[in-house]
Amino acid sequence: MRPIVNGLKKEYQVCMVVERVPFHSETYWGNLIDPIGTPEFALLDSSENILYRWVGFTEKEEFTMILDSLCDT
């Protein structure tokens, strides 16, 4: 999943910030997201509300379908 995430990070860097949070992380982001599986990806808005959540193996197209609608790249 890392190559997909790195590619998304580069492609959408003008409109989003990517944070890596270890699954059992006792950090601000870990507590905010409260992960339910691994791998897991959460898309938050600027108010830190979860807009979308992906759990398990995810194809790049599943991300880009959502990100393209929110981001002018």
Image: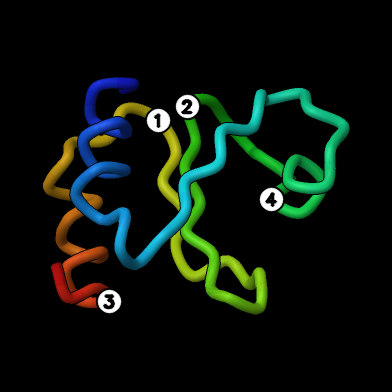
Q: Residue extending furthest front? A: 14
Q: CA distance from mark 1 to mark 4?
A: 15 Å
Q: CA distance from mark 3 to mark 2?
A: 23 Å
Mark 3 residue crowding within 10 angstroms, few (<14) / some (14–19) / many (20+): few
* Image location (x, y in percent) of residue 63: 24, 51
Q: CA distance from mark 4 to mark 3?
A: 20 Å
* Kind of element beneath mark 4: helix
* Image location (x, y in percent) of residue 19: 55, 41
Query: What residue did someone put label 2 on?
Result: 39
* Image location (x, y in percent) of residue 69: 19, 76
Q: Is residue 62 left or right of residue 56?
A: left
Query: What residue did someone put label 4 on?
Result: 33
Query: What residue did someone put label 1 on?
Result: 56
* Image location (x, y in percent) of residue 11: 19, 49
Disc 3 or 1, which lies upstream in sequence?
1
Q: CA distance from mark 2 to mark 1?
A: 5 Å
Q: Amino acid at mark 4?
A: Ile
Mark 2 in CB contact with mark 1 (< 8 angstroms): yes
